[in-house]
Amino acid sequence: MNVLSQLIVSGIAVGMIYGVIAFSYQLTFATSKTLNFGQGEALMLGALVGLTTINFLIGQALGTLWAYLLMLPIVFAFGLAQGAVVEWLGVRQAVKAKSEAGWIMATIALGIIFRNLAENIWGRDALRFPSPLPEAALTIGPVRIQPMEIAIVIGALAIMLAVEIFNRRSIFGKAVVATANDRDAAGLMGIDTRRVITFSYALSSMTAAFAGVLIAPVTLTGATMGAVLGLKAFAVAIIGGLSSGMGVIVGGLILGITETLTGYYISTGYKDVPGLVLLLLVLSLKPSGLFGRATIKKV
Amino acid sequence: MLEVNDLVAGYGKVKVLHGLSLHVEEGRLVTLIGSNGAGKTTTLRAISGMIVPESGTVRLGGEDLTGQPSFKITKKGLAHSPEGRRVFPTQSVKDNLLLGAFPRLTGARERGDVEGDLDRMFTLFPRLAERRAQLAGTLSGGEQQMLAMARALMLNPRVLLLDEPSMGLAPRLVAEVFATIARLKEQKITMLLVEQFAAAALEVADFGYVLENGRVAAKGPAEALRNDAAVRAAYLGHAH
Ligand SMILES: Nc1ncnc2c1ncn2[C@@H]1O[C@H](COP(=O)(O)OP(=O)(O)O)[C@@H](O)[C@H]1O
Ligand SMILES: [Mg+2]
């Protein structure tokens, strides 16, 4: 029983990371019906830019926690810019050329370019990311949990909530939702829907970059860290439905917990299998996901 | 206020409008009638920038807006309540109305009294007031139509385009929609009304155009069209 609850608790943090990346896929899908297949690379770049920034700030004799907090706005700004670049270079050109599958190729290609770029700047080795919180695990009842794992859950929920509040409360957020509902009608409201789509990409990459610096202290940071995360989170986005916020949280938790259980009861060698099996199952049984109705743009 | 000259437009290679001209003077209600597929919706789309005209010009208050994207044309003060209502289903009634005022709320148009205009819409359409917090997707067809009109009015438009506001509504609601249009006319709102109920449209309008196969087949003061033998035979013979 104690082992089981420990495994579940350990699965929650990684599950929330999957959930928040899956959420970032939803952001661009909602407004443009396209996805950034380089989302894992957005996460990776966020983590590495964060690493360089936090190390610089620590070099200025700042404590790790303060350095981490000061690093966040820089990572956010970088993520916004990186997402806008992906939309400009990849998606807009492909959509303008009326190439139905062009955005898929373009976002994959950009992802590969970003990975190469990162390898050249930060090297091929995995790097250690300074943890802003104590690394000693806390004991709560029967389970042990790292403070950073708690921070991951809070951070993931906070960013999703912040986006939700922005969408519901501000007139610009309402414009984003209107564009997602009906792009032509949004245009008739005086909304520049092209800019809204660029903004969605920016916000999406910002969210992924934030996920990168959330997970970086409990994992290793490097140019290849995003690839598997991006793919698994894509599975979660499909499982959870491309339009359901609740779906990605539940989907992420299911996957995260399934993985830790598989790792313990079967073998850590098979840890990555459940997510991909789930993806294959959902794609064949219920293409719109467990919670959503939208389907991927037919290509 | 609105001048359309020699408009040629369509969808890809399919031309629908073959040199259409029409004028809407300030404070007037002009109606565009014609059978299904004549090109009425296409005309409104080409005016509001939802499609790019091949040639011809669209002017609003003397300013050439031809070929501009719809969001820019809206910012200039042209509101378009499109065919099929197109309300935002996952947003509340109030949010739909606020989105109608988007250019005013974001500094692209003079702000004026947005809150006051919201209240005015709720007075004009009392049923929307009761449902202001409800999601637009859960409204009945008639309520969605009123929301679409109110949303367009929230722009404080210089010209309002209405595409078949009575489409798919029960007769009682059709009468209500026309009563609302008459009230907007009293408030001197400049309107271009596309309607399938030609008789009712010519009853309320000042001036009318009859569209056939993408061309103006007849035009004149509404009263003259009502009494025109050819128009009566083709469009008013078996009015609903
Ligand atoms: N999106 C579209 N793509 C291609 N053809 C269209 C489209 N919309 C309308 N048409 C065609 O254009 C013509 C005029 O349509 P429309 O302007 O909707 O007429 P109306 O509003 O007068 O009924 C019709 O022949 C219709 O089939
Ligand atoms: Mg029509």
Image (spheres, helix red, strand yellow):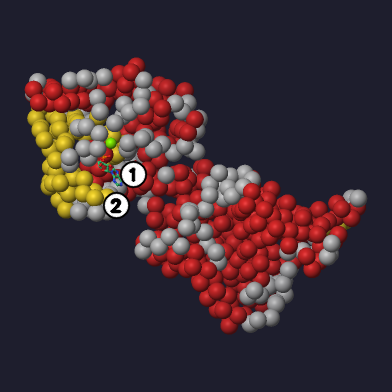
Image location (x, y in percent) of residue B71:
32, 49
Q: Is residue B27 visible?
A: no
- In the rendered image, residues at marks 2 and 1 fall on the same chain: no
Letter of the chain that mark 2 sits on in the rendering: B
Camera-nearest residue between B14 and B8: B14
Camera-nearest residue between B21 and B26: B21
Image location (x, y in percent) of residue A110:
51, 71
- Determine the residue positioned at 59% across, 50% down: A287
Image side of residue A214 versus residue B210, left or right = right
Number of disc labels: 2
- Determine the residue positioned at 36% across, 35% down: B84
Image side of residue A147 versus residue B137, left or right = right
Residue B217 against residue A124 in the figure, above or below: above
The residue singled out by tag 1 in the image is A188
Report crowding for label 2: few under 14, some 14 to 19, many 20 or more residues within 10 A (C-alpha). Answer: some
SS state under label 1: helix
Q: Is residue B167 visible?
A: yes
Whether label 2 lies within 8 Å of ligand 1 gets the answer no
Image location (x, y in percent) of residue A96:
36, 61
For marks 2 and 1, give the CA distance. 9 Å
Residue type (three-letter) at the residue carrying disc 2: Pro
Tag 2–tag 1 contact (CB < 8 Å):
no
